[in-house]
Structures are given as structure tokens and as C-alpha cells.
Amino acid sequence: MALLDNNKDVIPLSSISELLSAKVRTLKMYEEKGLLPLKKEVKKLYSINDIQIISFVHYLASVKKINVNGIKYIIAMLDNNMDEKNRADFLELVEQKLEKLSGKEVVDVESM
């Protein structure tokens, strides 16, 4: 049995929108604003690792109400100031927190 390659681009944005309970149009807007990992292919596919970033971007925008420039700054800090292991650990921690929030309404989350 082959191991999964978390860097292989195989997931379309429509599937990611279902995973995040977000509208495809919202994710495409993030893409247009340069908030998602850059994809050069015509048929844009994303990896498991990309989904961590996409879910983090969606959380920052929809729950924390951070604007595009703020999100770009946070993502740039992750990319430029963390080595790969620390970045992966941070995104894993964020993913765990997002899983806890996934069943709650945004209004409930904002009061936390």
C-alpha cells in the first residue's frame, strides 16, 4: 500500500467548499485576492496541505473578520518566519481548534 502524498494536488475547490461548509464563490474570491496557494494549472487542484491553509484563511476571514491585507500579512509571517516543522505544527494546532468550532454557529464562536 502506497503512502499518501499530502503535497499532491488532487482536490478541486468545490470539494474543499463542502469540507469547510463554505460557498465555492467565497473560496474563489479568496483565490482572486491572492489568499490561497498559487496554482498555475487551468484546472486548479489543491493538496491536503493546501486545505490547511485554505481553512485557516476561511477562519480568519469569516470568523475573525480579518481583511485581505491582514490575512496576507499573517500568511506571509507563516511563510517567512517559520521553518517547515513549526509551520506544520502551527497549522495542525489551528486545524484541531477549527474542528472544535466546526459544529458551532459563527455567532457562538465570536463570543468565545
Image: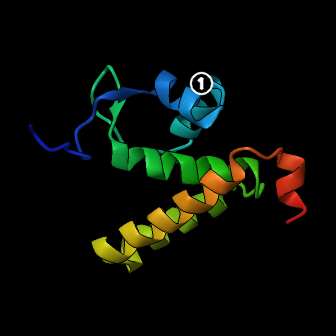
Give the x, y percent position of residue 73: 56, 66
Of residues 10 and 72, the one nearer the viewer is: 10
Residue 3 position (above or below residue 80): above
Q: Dot 1: what SS?
A: helix
**Which sits in the foreground, 36 or 89?**
89
* Residue 68 visible in the picture: no
Q: How many marks?
A: 1
Judge by depth and name the residue closer to the eye, 49 or 43.
49
**Quick check: can you spot residue 96?**
yes
Horizontal side, residue 87 vs residue 26: left or right:
left
- Packing grade of label 1 (10 A; few <14, some 14-19, many >=20) is some
The three-letter amino acid code for the residue at tag 1 is Val
Q: Whole-percent x and y of residue 88?
A: 37, 66
Give me the residue at 27% from left, 27% from top. Answer: 41
Residue drawn where x is 46% and y is 51% of the image: 52
State the image coordinates of residue 77 (x, y, percent, origin top left).
48, 73
Nearer the observer, 81 or 58: 58
Quadrant of the drawing holding the C terminus: bottom right
Extreme residue in the front direction: 1
Q: Position of residue 17 (x, y in %)?
A: 56, 29
Q: Residue at x 90, y 49 (%)?
A: 107
Q: Is residue 62 left or right of residue 29?
A: right
Q: Residue at x 51, y 46 (%)?
A: 54
Say if 9 sits above or below 106 in the image. above
Q: Report the quarter where the N terminus lies.
A: top left
Q: Which residue is mark 1?
A: 24
